[in-house]
């Protein structure tokens, strides 16, 4: 199964925020949308960075509450690992595990086409395991 299959199930909507917006605004957006990361983008189509809940927590731990007034660009991850719809899910899982991050923007021709979270990966793995278990049960039952 590929990333394309996961995106076809969950959709390609990606929440973005402009780099000049404040960290407080980003935190509110994450809480409001119940998501763990937001893609930083000037135009909503190209990836300029990514900001996660962890980034916000680290900023506040280092700088205190004043960090919340700073622009997202000051704390975002700039070197974002991205993927494409044709990537096998097992490969994406390996990329996320090795890189120790939980969100991967998916690009088509350099433009945002979706985002896959670790929750999406786990959901995919569980579905695959359940399907395999069911197939084995049916095989044994004859």
Image: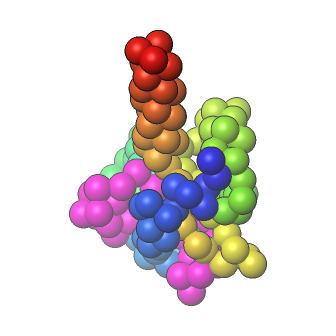
Q: Position of residue 102 (x, y in %)?
A: 53, 44
Can see residue 99? no
Q: Nearer the viewer, residue 10 or 18?
A: 10
Instruction: Give me the residue at 66% from left, 62% from top.
Output: 85
Instruction: Give me the residue at 50% from left, 64% from top.
Output: 8
Q: Position of residue 26 (x, y in %)?
A: 38, 65
Residue 45 falls within the magenta-colored stretch: yes
Instruction: Give me the residue at 69% from left, 74% from top.
Output: 108
Can see residue 126? yes
The colouring scheme, among rainbow, by chain, secondary structure or one colour, is rainbow
Q: Which residues are magenta?
A: 25-50
Q: Residue furthest left?
A: 32
Q: Residue furthest front?
A: 142
Q: Position of residue 44 (x, y in %)?
A: 53, 82
Q: Is residue 111 above or below residue 82?
A: below
Q: Is residue 49 above or below residue 37?
A: below
59 left or right of 29 in image: right
Which quadrant would the C terminus be assigned to in this image? top left
| Image quarter of residue 46 | bottom right
Residue 42 falls within the magenta-colored stretch: yes
Q: Is residue 34 above or below residue 72?
A: above
Q: Position of residue 6 (x, y in %)?
A: 52, 55
Instruction: Give me the residue at 50% from left, 19% from top.
Output: 139
Q: Nearer the viewer, residue 134 or 47?
A: 134
| Image quarter of residue 97 | top right
84 left or right of 54 in image: right
Q: How many marks?
A: 0
Q: Residue furthest bottom?
A: 43
């Amino acid at each position: 199964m590929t990333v394309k299959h996961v995106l076809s199930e969950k959709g390609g909507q990606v929440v973005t925020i402009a780099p000049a917006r404040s960290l407080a605004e980003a935190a509110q957006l994450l809480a409001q949308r119940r998501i763990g990361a937001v893609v930083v983008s000037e135009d909503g189509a190209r990836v300029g960075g990514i900001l996660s809940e962890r980034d916000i927590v680290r900023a506040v731990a280092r700088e205190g509450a004043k960090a919340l007034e700073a622009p997202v660009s000051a704390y975002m991850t700039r070197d974002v690992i991205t993927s494409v719809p044709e990537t096998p899910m097992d490969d994406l899982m390996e990329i996320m595990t090795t890189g120790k991050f939980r969100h991967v923007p998916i690009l088509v021709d350099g433009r945002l086409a979706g985002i896959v979270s670790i929750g999406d990966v786990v959901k995919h793995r569980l579905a695959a395991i359940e399907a395999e278990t069911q197939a084995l049960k049916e095989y044994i039952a004859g």
